[in-house]
Amino acid sequence: MHKLTTLFLYAFLADGLLSVADIASRQGTPGTLPDPLAVGVSLAVLLLGVVLFVGMVFTPRLSKRLLLPPLLFLGFTVVWSLVFGDKDILTLSVAESLLALGLIVGFWKQSGSGIQDFTSNRPLFTFKNFAFTALLNGTICMFIAALMILSFAQKLRYKCAEATNGYVTIQPGGISLEERTFQRGDREIRLISMIHIAKSGFYDEVAKALPATATAVVLLEGISDREHHLSGKLDYSNFAQWIGVASQKESSFSAQAAKGIAEAKTNRAEGKEQTNLEYQCADVDIADFKPDTIRWMQAVAHLFDSSSFREIIQKYSEVSKTLELGNEAAFAEVLTKRNEHLLGEIHNALETHTTVVVPWGAKHMPGLQSEIEKWGFVETARAQHQAVRFQNKTLVGFLALVDRMPVEED
């Protein structure tokens, strides 16, 4: 026990010093990977710490006075590094080194001959120690787990808003999507952030918020497949049913859009003028993408063409390689190519309509907003539509707690 405790403290000190040296050497070079030696030592110290943490339950010979401070600090550092990455880890590594050095010097001075096992004469196992330490460690583990969950939830909330430029926000009551209005002279563009699955009332709310005038046009999202590259459509209906929300394709908004498109085609064929809100398809065709992107989309469609979650798990093994190899590049092309096409459609629509409504996925919105602001459009209004409402009171209370946590910006 004496040697194990001594080994841990010196390893703890070495981990702090290596981490300081590693992070300091990578300052000013973002994206550089940590040194393998520093990572290896950190993992070894973490593993040894877990062994000692559990070992304190089974033997009173492991000094809690000596081991608890570095073990608790180690747990805090792990949580912090998982949530914030390298940010401020340099400060924590310095603190880790100082803590270990202080413990080593303190016990060395107290014993006069080095770190010693102050409980060496105690029995190897006592029920009293087992019960007390198990309760203590269990409480500590629950606290660390709660801290990790809170931290990850706070980071997810922040990252979600950051990735969509605030068009999607996770709030205590649910998930909300934002609508923003931009104007330039007598022309107006309304960007309405949408989602494939939401509560049914969300689609009703969006449909009712649309202008009824013939001077407005709605540019709809929806990739066409004229060459039949996909054997089945990308359908979120099953997934929506599993989590108790509605699929967009089965909503009042989609029904209204389909009716509007049919009416516009009839008017054009018969040479009639549009008398109310016009709907137009403004998306690309699958054939416009690169072959690798098409294969990636086929793999995604294959997954969603499932009748149960178990079937998705089974199918994932069939398409996992395609998804992993093409995910980043394919997603980037799907996003940028569709945005470029849509911007052209918006530009053309502004020549014939005073109001252009764009109800598209939230991920498209930051790029669209950036471009239309370059055209001279200025934001004039915002509105929020709740897409998902959290019914569970525990979840609502938990997110309310997350909402009060400070945001650590990158």
Image (cartoon, rainbow, N blue to C red):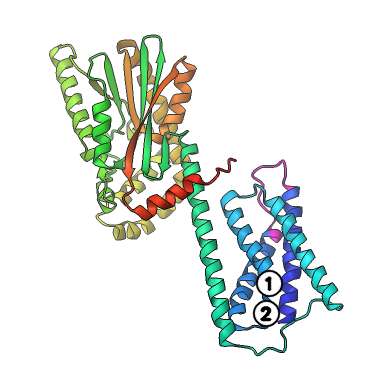
Q: Which mark is residue 67?
A: 1
Q: Secondary structure at mark 1?
A: helix
Badges 1 and 2: C-beta atoms under 8 Å apart? yes
Query: How far is the residue under mark 1 from the one under mark 2?
Result: 8 Å
Q: Quadrant of the N terminus?
A: bottom right
Disc 1 or 2, which lies upstream in sequence?
Answer: 2
Q: Is residue 48 magenta?
A: no
Q: Which mark is residue 62?
A: 2
- Give the residue drawn at x 56%, y 67%: 140
Check the image and report above or below for 140 versus 236.
below
Viewer-nearest residue: 210 or 297: 210
- Give the residue drawn at x 15%, y 11%: 271
- Give the residue drawn at x 72%, y 44%: 27
Tell me where residue 264 sits by quadrant.
Answer: top left
Near mark 1 (Cα within 10 A), the count class, few <14, some 14-19 or many ≥20, is some
Name of the residue lying farthest toward the top? 185
Residue 285, x across and y down, in percent? 32, 32
Check the image and report above or below for 8 versus 271.
below
Tell me where residue 120 sits by quadrant.
Answer: bottom right
**Main SS of residues in magenta:** loop
**What is the span of residues highlighted in magenta in the rendered image?**
25-38
Q: Amino acid at mark 2?
A: Leu
Q: Is residue 227 visible?
A: no
Residue 286, x across and y down, in percent? 33, 35
Q: Secondary structure at mark 2?
A: loop
Residue 269, x across and y down, in percent? 15, 16
Name of the residue lying farthest toward the left? 270
Q: Amino acid at mark 1?
A: Leu
- Give the residue drawn at x 51%, y 65%: 142
